[in-house]
Amino acid sequence: MISKIQITPAEFRVAAVIVAMAMSSQAAEFSLESARDAEEAGWAQMDKILDRIQPPVFPDHSVGIADFGGVGDGETDNRKAIAKAIDSVSQKGGKIVFPEGDYFVDGPIHLKSNIHLHLEKGSRIFFSSKAESYLPAVKVRWEGTMCYNYSPLIYGNGLKNIAITGEGVIDGNAVKWSKTWRNKQKPDKAVLRQMGNDTIPDEQRVFGNGFLDLDGDGKDDGYGDGNPHYLRPCLFEVHECENVLLEGLTLKDSPFWTIHPVFSKNIIIRNLNVRGGTLNDDGIDPDSCEDVLIEGCTVKTRDDAISIKAGRDQDAWKRPPIRNIIVRNNRLQANTNAFCIGSEMSGGVENVFVEKNVIINARFAVNFKCNLDRGGQVQRVYIRELDIESCRDNMILFTMDYHSHRGNDFPTKFNDFYISDIRCRTVEKKPFEIVGVEEAPIRRMFLSDIQIDSAGAASTLKHAKDIVADRVTIAGRVFEPEHRDPG
């Protein structure tokens, strides 16, 4: 579980700058000078976060999956062999090696502490599409709401020191069943969201096959309905884990979101090739985590390439936020958002650092999205050195009316955004659409050294206060936002 962090003197200075701005009631006090000072103080935190993020360490002990009966012939079910290997190696920790071959797995891989799976070049782990193989149900966070559901294809809960590395492929093999399930999942999604809204106890949110036996007596605990449900599992999801490393792999064709660490700490996601295959195929979605480094990845999805999350609506308000996230040196291509925060962000988002990324093509380059169900707060987001080829709609977008609003009125607070050193060649619609909510305007945004070569429409700023721009040009013209709310 995420823990508290001691504040260093340098971090105290950063906090003092932010508190001073928050206490300011005059828009003019957020000046060019104060914005630059706050931006510099914010970026100074990143090295301290990086110092804390360290890869897991394993004993010098290695076995081959063949030692436990694993066969890479593309037909043999390797589920039992992998489970045996994990049970054996976890006792003292070490590496399980998958040499070249196609390793079929009829069901999930459940990790244990001190396990390092290594996929050599030419190896592929691929999964079955039989839902019943992903039972019994396990605890997951599904689109921001806790429940018991089919197991993710690779899953861990309450672990320390886990890694999956190598040049191999992890293939969810999901296209043929995920599309069908997506059409069937709407009733289950509506029920789960109502449960989250009503803060029903997690153990009463039973999906999967409608059966949950946590006490081990062979009987349903009393809240399952015995019916099949259709909430799709993620490819990789871990809960309340520490010291997690994913490096070098190709991950493709997930049934749902691809990489989804939840309530976890000290995570490195490095040099991955993530390829979606169907709708809701988000690439990398850290969720209510702390101290996360995402770097050197190539992500190509239909949905969001990288999305920072912190739970949905009332279900997340008393659960941990997401904080101290570094996203750098990635290549992103998405049919929707290249980088976004939300829409599940109700537990709070803070201290996000995004730098030196290339966005090849996306509908929206950067999107902060929520609706009036969400509540929560998004603050202290630092973005610099983006190289953007093209955006089909907006370059920077704040979406306050994201779909599936259930009728509540809990506006999210957005404050302290610092975006600089951006080169964008083409925006087909509005470069900036910065539109808050009247009762909770977006506060304190600094835009600097941004060049947009061409744009199809004028930007929109509304319900946004203290927006400062310096050396921002759109099609050769200087962009000068109002420093007050244009209403």
Image (tube, grey):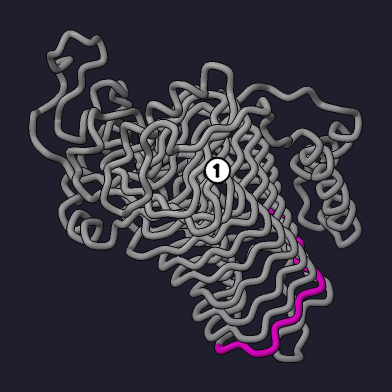
Residue 186: x and y, percent?
19, 51
Q: Which residue lies under the disc numbered 1?
A: 118
Residue 380: x and y, percent?
70, 47
Left-right relation of 433 to 417: left
The rendered magenta stretch, by its main secondary structure, is classed as: strand
Residue projecting furthest to the left: 226
Seen at 67% across and 32% down, the residue is: 56
How many labels were placed on the picture?
1
Seen at 40% across and 31% down, the residue is: 68
Relative depth, front residue between 383 and 303: 303
Left-right relation of 453 to 105: right
Task: Indicate whether residue 325 is drawn in magenta.
Answer: no
Seen at 58% across and 56% down, the residue is: 272
Q: Please provide the residue range marked out in magenta.
A: 443-456
Residue type pointed to by label 1 = His
Left-right relation of 437 to 3: left
Q: Is residue 368 visible?
A: no
Q: Is residue 433 visible?
A: yes
Quadrant in which residue 174 is drawn: bottom left
Residue 230: x and y, percent?
19, 46
Relative depth, front residue between 453 and 132: 132
| Secondary structure at numbered mark 1 | strand
Label 1: few (<14), some (14–19) or many (≥20) C-alpha neighbours in 10 Å: many
Seen at 81% across and 37% down, the residue is: 51
Residue 11: x and y, percent?
84, 34
Q: Where is the C terminus found, in terms of image quarters?
A: bottom right
Task: Indicate whether residue 444 is drawn in magenta.
Answer: yes
Relative depth, front residue between 205 and 315: 205
Residue 77 vertical placement versus 239 (above, below)? below
Residue 335 vertical placement versus 380 (above, below)? below
Quadrant in which residue 361 is drawn: bottom right
